[in-house]
Image (tube, rainbow, N blue to C red):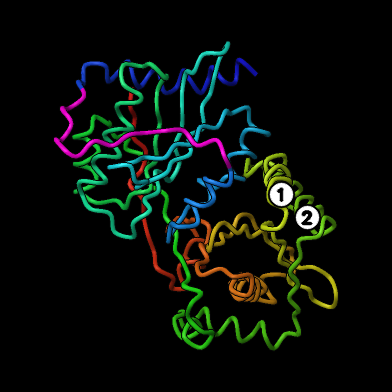
Amino acid sequence: SIAAHSVFACDVMKEAVTCSNVQPAVAVPVGACFIREVRSRQEWDALFNRIEAPAIVQSWAYGEAKAASGGWRVERMVFERVGQPVAICQVLVKRVLGLAVAARINRGPLFLAVSPAAEEVQAVYTALRQRWRFGRRGVLVIAPGLADSENHRAWLTAAGFRSRRAAGWCSAVLDLRLDDETLRRQLSSNWRNHLKVSERGGLEFDVSTEQAAVDWILARHGEHMQEKGFSGTPVDFLRALQCHAPEDFFVLRVLQGGHPVAGMIAFRFGRSAEYFIGWYGPEARQAKAGNFLLWHAARAMRSQGCERFDLGGYSSSDGYGRFKQDMRGAEYRLIGEWLAF
């Protein structure tokens, strides 16, 4: 609705007014970086698949699902230097009465190089800042796909962005190129012991992309949100995501005596997959079904051609976050939210 869109716009516009006395810094003199829009899924996927560590929220299907379920318009950009693409970025734009009032970038831009040079990163963010300068496209809220470091903060500030001082996304990634023995050895001793208990408990693992399995997990997810009184990932969005990439939308379940006691959605994008939402029944804790589910989910995603399995974000201050941390993946923390106006 227009009212809901206005609330989003109002929040970021208030912050823009508060910071209006901050003048954008002069850009660092680096090589020119040009932006052009991408409208073809074929071109987007070709570039996206070149990225070693992509982000689920920058995938084509994710953008289309947000447009279908949340009233966003999607813009996709490629950044080029000397005629060659160096980065890509998916932007969600919110409009009111046809006018762009705010835009959001989550975990982007994504760089095609594994370790892009400092001047390349600065050029991309300077070009991005220029595109949203003087409010021509509304206010930009960006949660960059950059690790939280002093250098990255300095580069964003130099380009004219302002920090919102919000905590950055934190998660960990399992390297699925490793064999089972190596991955298992990396687990914390407590996590590994619980996995052994689950394996002796007669649990079974099931993975499916069938509609019946999708309907089952979405029903459990909706019930869980209602029972616990929280707002998680909307069911409508999950249905839209499955609609746009049914072959990448996996339902993974743990069965005890033929009865599901735990389940999750894992989504594949490029050579990566991510834990998206999970459900655990009343029998799950005693059976250590969570350990069984995550361990076999990682192995299942490897069998589907994935090289990375992202554990889906967490906070180390909560019990479930510590549970994920104990899988001992490669942890990362991003730089948080920034503004351009």
Q: Is residue 335 above or below residue 132?
A: below
Q: Residue furthest front?
A: 83
Q: Secondary structure at mark 1?
A: helix
Residue picked out by circle 2: 214
Instruction: Specify the amino acid type for callout 1.
Output: Gln
> Which stretch is magenta?
24-40
Task: Identify the residue at horizontal 34%, vertical 29% (top origin).
Answer: 339
Residue 19 drawn in magenta: no
Residue picked out by circle 1: 242
* Residue 101 in the image, given as x and y percentages of width and height: 47, 18
Please identify the quadrant where the C terminus is shown: top left
Q: Is residue 156 above or below residue 334?
A: above
Please tell me in which quadrant of the rendered image residue 115 appears. bottom left
For the residues carrying marks 2 and 1, which lies nearer the camera in this image?
1
Q: Secondary structure at mark 2?
A: helix
Please identify the quadrant where the N terminus is shown: top right
* Residue 150 in the image, given as x and y percentages of width and height: 20, 48
Q: Dot 1: few (<14), some (14–19), or many (≥20) neighbours within 10 Å?
A: many
Task: Identify the residue at horizontal 32%, vertical 34% (top origin).
Answer: 34
Nearer the N terminus, badge 2 or badge 1? 2
Q: How many marks?
A: 2
